Amino acid sequence: MAIAKESLFNAREFDQSLAETKNPLPLFRSALQSGRETLRQKFRDDGGAAALVTAHAWLIDQLMVRAWRRHLPLLPAGIPFALVAVGGYGRGELHPASDIDVMILLDRNDPAKTRSFIETLVRFFWDMGLEVGHSVRTLKDCVREAKNDLTVVTNLMESRLLDGDEKLFEKMRRMTHASKIWPSRKFFAAKRQEQITRHHHFDDTAYNLEPNIKDGPGGLRDIQTISWVTQRQFDTASLHDLVGHGFLSEEEYHTLIRERNFLWHVRAGLHYLAGRREDRLLFDHQRALAREFGYQDRPGFLAVEQFMKRYYRTIKELSLLSEILLQHFDEAILARGRAKTKPINRRFRSQHGFVEVTHPRVFERAPFAMLEIFLVLQQHPELKGVRAGTIRLIRANLHRIDNQFRKDLACRSLFMEIMRQPRGITHELRRMNAYGVLGAYLPAFGRIVGQMQHDLFHVYTVDAHSLMVLRNLRRFTVPEFRGEFPLASEIIQKLVKPERLYLGGLFHDIAKGRGGDHSELGEKEAEAFCRLHNLSEYDTRFICWLVRQHLVMSSTAQREDISDPDAVLRFAQQVGDQEHLDNLYLLTVADMRGTSPAVWNAWKGRLLSQLYSATTRLLRRGIAQPVDLKEHVADLRKSALEKLGTSGLPEAEINRFWQDLDDEYFLPYDAESLAWHAQAIAGARATDLPVVATRWTPEIGGSEFLIYTPDRDDLFVIMTAGFDRFNLSIMDARIHTLRNGFALDTFVVLDHTGQPVSDPRALAQLQKAMRDQLLKPQPGRDPQSASLPRQMKHFPIETRVLFSPSPKGQLTIMEVTAQDRPGLLYQVALALKQCRVNLVAAKVATYGERAEDIFFINGRDGLPLTDKNQLASLETEIVRRLEPVPAKTETRSVEF
């Protein structure tokens, strides 16, 4: 996109009008608005951000210099001065809403003589529509502040004289040059640490749901860091000069500029869309930008996902180029003395602690070395990484990883050897992915690189998630992390072939984004890999089974009543044996933890461990020998009585309490919980009613409420209204009706941050508040007044209600899928009451913006629901109550 400067600003006409007016402000304001509107229209028509940012800076130059000169009569004669552009404006790069930073440079400052000029000038800048950031400095100020502040010296490096005393400006440049302050060695070390700190702020990943295109890893700030170091070391701001110095190839330079221009394009679009400076690629803007940039939905692949895939691949490419350049700088600037070279084998050696090839044609002569190098890094933990020149050679030879390469015995053996190493598997697979080797060797993996799933549940790209799952699996093996997941750490030590588990983790989501069932498609990819790599028939079937069934344990634990022996039996029949169960449990925990930091919590961990333990017991006894319910209940009662031995409660009172309960009451609880119930209720007097007890134990994963009160039709509504008012989320609910007309209900809840309430004083306050709620019921919050988080407003979920009979036919299962929101269960309770339906149990699961809740219900007669009209009425009532709350946002039409 070429922009004719005359179309932005007609200098002759402007200067003539300026000379004729006594009120110049409207003229400046009109010229700025007209020029910016022309730029906006050019961007909309042609989309060239590189021309846009330089043309915008030129436009601002014309107006600022003329405004400066217009105000010069206010400055006393004889004071050397200069108007200097700094920062991005100093580079001559201005995005639509970027800061316009200027410095008024003085030889010496006399505030009494300069204050009026500066204040009037800056006020004029703002009045004409420029958001100016300004500083006033003398030469001594520049040197002093630059010595003490890395940001200041960086700004001064990028300074550009707009108008004024050229000699004064050049003197400032000399006094702040690398030969005077911040020599390149010190400057590079400081900038490198600054970048590391900045990357830590973004969790060292660019693969965030709402990435920052300027400051995030691989973003524009990383390119600027390269430019700053180049300027400090070589006295040039031109990135192309890095080619002449041997730091970049010509092809890499063009890649760097192409990807930078793409980020400029995105940033300019963001500024126009937001109507202000915005560097975060928020959900608010992702869909709109994808549409404006011409992306269109395809089957199984949304336009916004295509756009974000392009973005993430750009960031990946820039991150790698940044790594290459910074390593070059490290050797050229920081390294001292003669390089220490240590041979490793015929193809590799260590140089400055980094592995490099012994000859530039190693990968041409022995292509398998492109896999071997990662094995070398695993086997030599003293190595810090790969030398920049060798990274460049790997990338230049990626075309050699073809079908013949994949079929080569040496290559297949090397890859499996990498997967079997005792250390470094995650690090090296991530490095292989960064260099493009993993996607070339496994083409199916290459297709998921940068693939984002546009929801709040998956916060990483599919490739980053898969490697995060692998990292979580490897973390189970590290002794210092044993305390995080003791059960998983114990199980993984017993695995005969952990590489099967790692391959299951690598392949479990490899078919995402293709449409269809990714588990089935992934199974086919895993089978092809296993057969190509000569794995045994048993190992092949084992890995394929893990990929195909990787969701079944999570689904069973969160969607079925795992206190029901029949549910456990069905799951055990799917698993088959202990070896499959062990691997599936480990993969499930790693997968759930690797989806999003917000997805995992202790409650989900407890569900999985409960299912694992129950299935293990069943497998040891034998699937053909189901649990004897009477015997199981008798064992639970006996164990609970033993725990109550020191409570002072007579055994006769406890048994009288239990006589009013069915056997089904005992199944969801362990002996410890049953003892807690009995102790709170069995000895209660009439004046103690209603009984409310709370507790928190780390093993439960949530805060528990026990409620014992006379039953009534609207009891569930009253209780859920209370939890809603207390801002607590119900994760599990068990409703028991006793023969004496009382209700015994238990709840597991989390607070609004997804954490259990563990403080004893807070639990005591909640216990009292719930008792007050039962005695004097108050309604829950108005759903229209409950505001949704900003991100959720962009993911409306259609409410769906499905009914099915329970496996035993005694209950009706109601599955509700809806947008997660405060008070969801309270609204369901109101619908159940309205339709005269009883709740027996509830299981709540949240996946990002989507709630998938399971309710076990029956009619007032205690029988499953069979009346189609009643089911239809219940569905209609739930859908009505759970309609997504409309976003209360200002509607504004924005055109590029």
Image (spheres, helix red, strand yellow):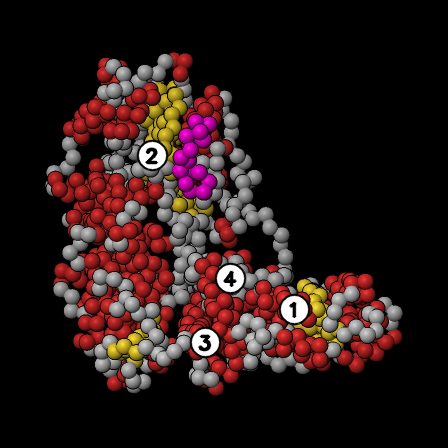
CA gap between label 1 and label 3 equals 25 Å
Q: Is residue 765 above or below residue 274?
A: above
Task: Residue 677 in the image: state x and y as whole percent.
Answer: 31, 24
Q: Which residues are magenta?
A: 747-765
The amino acid marked with disc number 3 is: Ile
Residue 95 in view in this figure: no
The amino acid marked with disc number 1 is: Cys
Tell me, yes or no, whether the highlighted magenta stretch contains residue 751. yes
User: Which numbered dot is residue 212?
Assistant: 4
Residue at (41, 22) in percent of width and height: 712
Tell me, yes or no, whether the highlighted magenta stretch contains residue 61. no
Q: At numbered mark 4, what does the secondary structure look like: helix, strand or loop?
A: loop
Q: Earlier in the sequence, mark 2 or mark 1?
A: 1
Task: Residue 295 in the image: state x and y as whole percent.
Answer: 49, 68
Mark 1, residue position = 142
Residue 727 in view in this figure: yes
Mark 2, residue position = 697
